[in-house]
Image (tube, helix red, strand yellow):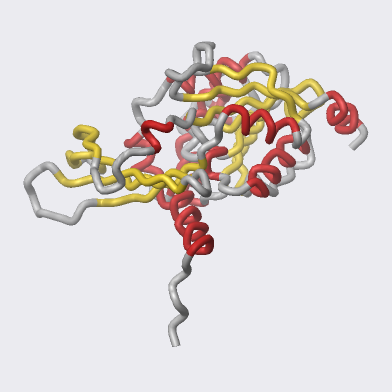
Amino acid sequence: MAEPPPTGRARASAEERRGAAAHYEDPVYYEQTYRRRREDVAFYAALAAKARGPVLELGCGTGRVTRAMARAGAEVVAVDRMASMLRYARDRAEREPAAARERVRFVRGDLRSVRLGRRFALVVAPFNVLMHLYTRRDIERCLATVRAHLTPRGRLVFDVLLPDPATLGRDPSRVYKGGRVRVDGVPHLYGERFSYDAARQVEHVDLIFERADGDRPAPPRVTPLAMRQLFPAELEALLHYNGLRIVRHEGGFEGEPLDRWSDSQVVFARLRADHSRSSTSQ
């Protein structure tokens, strides 16, 4: 007898797990989708160049930020749980100049539980990585990973989207057109469909790609994405009660102030003084 489909919270959790993985299963598609996103790469590369120590990257994906940090002169340990992403990242890193290539180590691991037995001057989680942690418990486990790896004077730096009530309230039956893109060399029309689970603070997005070359009609490619919304005051509380303090909370990658017009939150945090002292004795 078949088991009944999950309902309520169990169904939401299943959709979140799928939305955390599906978008990242095809690294080539991922690279093509975000090939024009560069401002965060330059930002993290500049941070790594000034880190005065090794860098830990949580959620490295295809390694687009990893490679830039290594080219900037940093020793980088890059962690991701997706085997397909790590294979692609390693392959791309092999094409880098020898000096940069030798500064990178890739590790398969879950950012909620990985332990490397060493500490880092800088821990980064670029491009909305923390938005794939859907519960307080998951976020706290990730922050425990950060605490376990930061030097006493080290910094955690990450970016997440700034929740916008207007966009979270978009019509879930409408497909918002996003223009033409190329996927595997074939032109496609790109669109997005949004729905928001306010009780769980999770936005669900369907990324929709329809062939636009007129050949061989095919059903659209639909990839789910689930993103936990993290409000500024909530972030401050989560970090504070998990042994960290925010030292800068900005609205962009060029130091813009955080305000209602910001697209992203860029957060700089350090260990709280009591946790910094305890970390030296571990």
Give the mark count: 0
Front residue of 202 and 87:
202
Q: Nearer the viewer, residue 118 or 241?
A: 241
Residue farthest along the right direction in this orientation: 281
Q: Residue at x 43, y 30 (%)?
A: 164
Q: Is residue 277 above or below residue 62?
A: above
Residue 79, image quadrant: top right
Image x and y of residue 261, in percent: 43, 18
Q: Is residue 209 above or below residue 44?
A: below
User: Dividing the picture into quarters, in which one does residue 188 lie?
Assistant: top left
> Which residue sits at x=26%, y=51%?
221
Front one among 71 and 269 = 269
Relative height, residue 75 to residue 197 (above, below):
above
Q: In which quadrant of the rendered image does the N terminus lie? A: bottom left
Whole-percent x, y for residue 278 in the image: 89, 32
Give how far across and how far down residue 83 sits, in percent. Answer: 52, 51
**Residue extending farthest bottom:** 1
- State the image coordinates of residue 59 (x, y, percent, origin top left): 56, 39
Q: Is residue 216 left or right of residue 114?
A: left
Q: For the C terminus, give its image quadrant.
A: top right
Q: Residue at x 72, y 17 (%)?
A: 52
From this view, report whether residue 213 is shown above or below residue 2: above
* Residue at the image position 53 percent from the left and 60 percent from the top: 9
